[in-house]
Each structure stands twice: as structure tokens, then as C-alpha cells.
Image (cartoon, grey):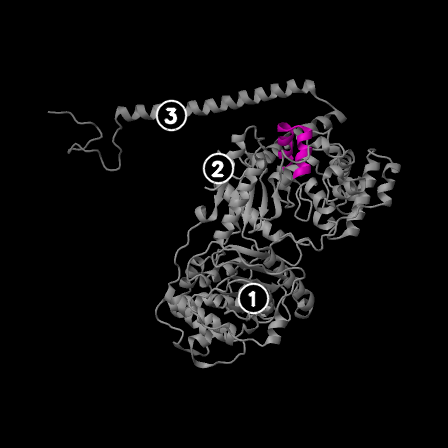
Amino acid sequence: MSERRPDEDATGESPAGQDAPRPRGGRRLRNFLLAIDSWIDSTIYSGGVNLRAGWDGFVAFTERFNVQGPGRWAIALASEGMTWGAVGAVLMLALAIPAFKETSDDWLKRAELSVTFLDRYGNTIGERGIRHNDTVPLEEFPDHLIKAVLATEDRRFYEHFGIDIPGTFRAVLSNARAGGVVQGGSSLTQQLAKNLFLSNERTLERKIKEAFLALWLEFHLTKNQILKLYLDRAYMGGGAFGVDAAAQYYFGKSARDVNLAEAAMLAGLFKAPSKFAPHVNLPAARGRASVVLDNLVDAGFMTEGQVFGARRNPATPVDRKQDDVPEYYLDYAFNEVKGIVDTLPKSYAERSFIVRTALDPNIQKAADTAIRDSLRQFGKDYGASQSAMVVMEPSGAVRAMVGGRDYGESQFNRATDALRQPGSSFKPYVYTAALMTGKYTPQTIVVDGPICIGNWCPQNYGRSYAGSIPLITALTRSLNTVAVKLAENIGRGRIVDLAHAMGVKSELKITRALPLGAAEVTVLDQATGYAVFANGGMSVSPHAVIEMRTPAGEPVWNFAQDGPKSKQVIPPNIIAMINPMLNSVVENGTGRRAMIPGTKVSGKTGTTNAYRDAWFVGFTGNYVGAIWFGNDDYTSTRKMTGGSLPAMTWQKVMAFAHQGIEIKPTPGLGNQPPPVLDGAVAEASALKIEGVRRPVTLSPAAAERLMGLSARMRDAASQPLRRPTAAADIAAPVATGSN
């Protein structure tokens, strides 16, 4: 019989409410965990005691070095300064790292690009870029020119390490006393760093980058190399880069030959070339030159007696009022050349090029003259102060470009860089896209009536409706409601895709007002797009460069071989429909003032809301032209429409351009006879330029042969003349001359 534990009943189970005894393994685990907990507690406690004892010992040790009085504050300030200095250094380094990325191995080489431009006939029209190695050596610059620059821009140039700290503090104090910026604090090296790598934005980040890049330049170049680069790379106004180019432009001489008065005027241009350029504001330029002469004396570089003659006889620049250099065109062509050079193999070392452009100097002069005369005669009445124009061949070769009324006052190219709403001159893209769907023809009847899209209800110019009319009549009368209805039916995305395919590069935002020209484009965009109408529907790549050669005559690039290839973007049957519609706009609609005697003209006017922008874009079988009038600040004109001053000015330029050339038919118009204009009207609208007669246009093949002949003549001239020494030598040319 087995024994029972006292706490068990007869069934062998523990009585209710009593716990069963734990097994021995559980007791051991509990004891182990309690031991760990005890160890952690004791360790933390003892560690704290030891740490406190160690800290007390450290404090007792440092008490031996306790400094009282002013020394204590000096140490505290030094410690804080070192702390915040380290933080600032890290921050500045973080800002400078992006700037250092600009200093690649070929940064100096890239900046040496030099281009001599020729017009389409092979005549030199101007230069762009900078020759670093081939310009005037530093030792050949006059001593008074170097001193004038250093006295005005950086008197301690040869003493500082790239950042003139005393000069910076002096400038801060001078500006504080004057209550404005009267003296710059940047060293000459910092200014060069900004010119080479940075923009002109006034931000703390740019100043920090400028300082680090100045130190980088000082480390990699000698002082004389930095000074030489500064003299060669700075913009001096009037489209001139570098002191020598500025001396040639303003005084018609090399920088080697400028006198003290001229050197002072040149040295005064570094601060603000657009403000102190002598061809823009001669009194301001002379006042600035007087300040430079004061600087020469204050710096101790010259005495008052030495500068007295320059004060009494200030510099007089050459007259640039009749200068025919196509500056805006050259800027555009130079940017194109830089893009082409970037595509050349990296192993290609040549940095100097001779570039033949598509420029027609007579059409360029006609465009400059027409715009200048229009603004002078009618600009005030219409409230318009600026204009821009592009004339190109239907192939995309740009014959003329006007980027503003005066390049000397503003180098901003409004033909290529200004985004403006085209107004109704955008409608041909809408109508062409509609015709390409196959649902419409010029004779399709559409309804000109009210339409609302949400809360937007566009209206026609005269706030009236014509009812049921043919599509050609709607475009001729430039009816807004019809254009909006077409866009609703075919989709605005289709219109945007077609405009981009036709060469419009600007972003076209899809909005309700897109078919009315609410998206912004450039003048070059519009000329490019309309060129597709003029050439029968082929895509166009606008270009100024025809070919590039080295100074030795070696070919580098040719548009016919290396340029983008055209493709058909509008079918010929659509061109045969849209071009007669655009011709009707000129002969029967809003563009009647653009008609040219003896030539069929097609085109479209454009006027934006509040009369801010006025356009005329048109074409013939020979040329395409786009012109804009308005104001830089987007203020409204005095109700100027595209059919007024823009169409009149366009007509003067294009009538001149069509003189003495074979008139080509416009695709889609066949051999329709041109409209007969009243003789008096035609005579009054013709542009007359003194001393210029429109020459017969050379064909591309003829121009190519002339350029080849010119190259062979240069090669022959470069060969040394060999003196004949025998009868056989004299007879040899005769024997082969008949072949």
C-alpha cells in the first residue's frame, strides 16, 4: 500500500486552492535571473560611483589650471570661436564642393573658343570668343593701363592670397559710411572666379563659392596668369570681351596703343559695362574715367601731374551709331557653334574656327532699319518700346535676326530668349491639326457661335458671331470661337504634338485657351514653325551656321552633311489646303498690310489679351519672317494689333528682300498670279536703305563653289613662290595649262 503526501486527498490530487510545488529546474532558473539582476544593479551603481569619483578627480586636477580675470574670458571666447569656426568651415566646404566640380581639367581650354564669322558671301562680319594664347601678351599692355585696372579693381593684387581681407573690411566700412554700395570688396581673383565659373546672382552661397574658387585659382596659376585671364575674359560692353577687343571696339585701336585717358575709360568698364559703356552714355563713361584717375593718384601709382593731361583731354570713342555689326545674330550663331563644338570628339584640340553663316547683310540691315524707324515713328503712339524679328529661308537657314532696338542698351535677345504669347498667330497649328484628321477641308461649314468651357466663354474680337461659315473664312477673319471648337473636337494634345513636330521648342502648356495662343513661344519658334508651311511640310532645324573650318581651311562641320535631317511632318495634300487659307488671311483678312508687290504672301496676325503682344508671321516661296512688337515689362500697348505696325514693318523688310531675286512659288498656291497693288501704295511701302541695293541671291551651289575657290586662293597665296631655274621649269606650266 502506497503512502500519501499530507497535502493530497484520496484521489491523489492537491486540495483546491493550494499550489503544487515547483520543480527544481524552475527554482534554479529563478535564482539565476535574480543573480543577473543583482549583478547589473551592482555594476551600474559601482560604475556611477567610480565615474563620479573620476570626475571629481578630474575637476580637482583642472582646478590647478584655473584662470581668473580677463584671461578666463579670453580662453572662453577662443574656445567658442574655435567651435563655431569649425562648424562654419564645414558648412563653407559643403557649399564649395559643387563649385569645385566646375574646375574640370579642360576648364581653361573650353574658355579659349574663338570664332571668326563670315556672311553667306564670305565676308567677315564679326568675331566671338576669346583667344587666351594669341591675344596681346601681358608685357605688351601699356603700364598705365595695368595700373589703372589695379588701382580701381584690386590695389593689393600682388600682396594677397586671393582674398584681400583688409580690402574687404575697408570696403565694408566705406559702404557703411555711405549708406550704400560705393566700393566693392571682391579681389581681382574673386572677380575672375565669378566670370569663369559662377553667375552674377547676389547670394551668400555664391560669395562663399567665389572665395574658395579664388583660392583654387591662386594655387593653380601665377599672379600674372590671373591678371592676364582677367584682362582677356571680362565683358566690357558692346559685345566685346577682353581689354583688347574693347579697345578695338571703342577706340579703333589695339590695347597696346591706348593713352592714359583711354586706359582710364577702359578700366572703368569692369564695374558695370552696360552703365559706363561710352557708346551708350559718354558722360557717365567720362565721369567713371575721372574716378579711375583719382584711384591712380590715391593708390600712389601716379601723381596728379601725370594724370592732369588725361583730365583735360578725356577719351573720345569712335562713332558706333552707324555700326552694322549684327550683334544679336552673332550671339545666336556663337551659341550654335558652342553646341557643335561640344559634339566634336574630345581628342579634337582646335579651338579657333572660321564659320560661314547664312546671314544676308542687306536683309539684316533692312530689318534693323525697318524696326528702328517703326519704333521711332510709331512706337510712342502705340505705346511699344521693343521689337524682334527673324527672317529665314524655308530650309531653316537664318538670314537675319533682330533681338531688340539697341544692342548697346540691352544684349538680351528677344528673338530667341523672350517667351511671349503668340495670340492668333498660333491658330494655323490648330487649323492644320484639324485638317490632318481628315474631318475638315477649307470649305467645311462650321458654326461661329457662343461656346463656354466651364466658366470660360471666349469671344471674337468684335464681340459678334458670323453663324455658319466655311473654315477658310473663319481663319481669314481670325474667329476665336471656331478655333476653340476645333480644339475641343480634335484634342489639344494633338495640336501641341504638331507644333513641336514643326519646330516649336518652347513648352506648350495645355490649357483651355491654348488654341487662342495662350502658351508662350519665341519669335524664332514661330519662324521655324511657319517654315514648314513654306517648304511643303518638311521639318526644319533653324540654323545660322552653314560650315565650320579651321584657320588653315580644313573642314570641321557642314550643315548639309552633319546637320539634322528633315522629315515630312505635314502631308502635301494638307499643305495644299492650309497655305491657300493663310494666303486668304493676307489678301482678304487681317494681314492685308503685309502684301508685297508681285509676290504671293501667306501668314497670320496675332494680338494677345490687353494688347501686350502684337505679331505678324508670314512666308513666301523664298522667305519666312516672324516679327513681334511690345514692351519688356509686359505692359499693354495702345491697342496695337498684329495687322498694324507688325504687318507694316514685316512688309517693308520682306519687300526689300524680294528685290532682284527669282520669285519661287509657294507650295499649295501653284502659279496663282500675285495681287495687283496700287502703284502709290507699293511705292510708299517700299523700304529704301541709303547706299544699299538688293543683290541677286546666290544659290547654295554657287555659294559653295565661291567658298571653294576662296579656299584654293588662300592655299595658293600661302605657298612660297618658287623661282624658275631652267627652261623646262618655265615651259612646264604652259604644257599643262590646256588640260
Instruction: Report the disc number at residue 615.
Output: 1
What secondary structure do most residues of the magenta stretch adopt?
A: helix
The one of 565 and 443 positioned closer to us in this rendering = 565
**Looking at the image, which residue sits at the far right?**
305
> Who's the residue at 10% across and 25% down the image?
1
The one of 509 and 392 positioned closer to us in this rendering = 392
Instruction: Report the disc number at residue 7.
Output: none
Q: Residues within 10 Å of mark 3 (few under 14, many from 20)?
A: few
Q: Amino acid at mark 2?
A: Ala
Res. 594 image quadrant:
bottom right
Horizontal and vertical percent position of residue 81: 67, 30
SS at mark 3 in the image: helix
Q: How many marks?
A: 3
Horizontal and vertical percent position of residue 512: 46, 67
Residue beneath disc 3: 34
Q: CA distance from mark 1 to mark 3?
A: 92 Å
Rendered position, 32 above or below 299:
above
**Looking at the image, which residue sits at the far left?**
1
Task: Tell me which segment is drawn in magenta.
Answer: 210-232
- Quadrant location of the C terminus? top left
- Mark 2 vs mark 1: which is more N-terminal? 1
SS at mark 1 in the image: strand
Horizontal and vertical percent position of residue 9: 18, 33
With 141 as the anchor, is 197 left or right in this view?
Answer: left
Q: Amino acid at mark 3?
A: Leu
Q: Amino acid at mark 1?
A: Trp
> Who's the residue at 77% across and 33% down the image?
143
Res. 311 image quadrant:
top right
Residue beneath disc 2: 735
| Residue 352 can be seen, yes or no | no
- Mark 3 vs mark 2: which is more N-terminal? 3
The one of 517 and 136 positioned closer to us in this rendering = 136
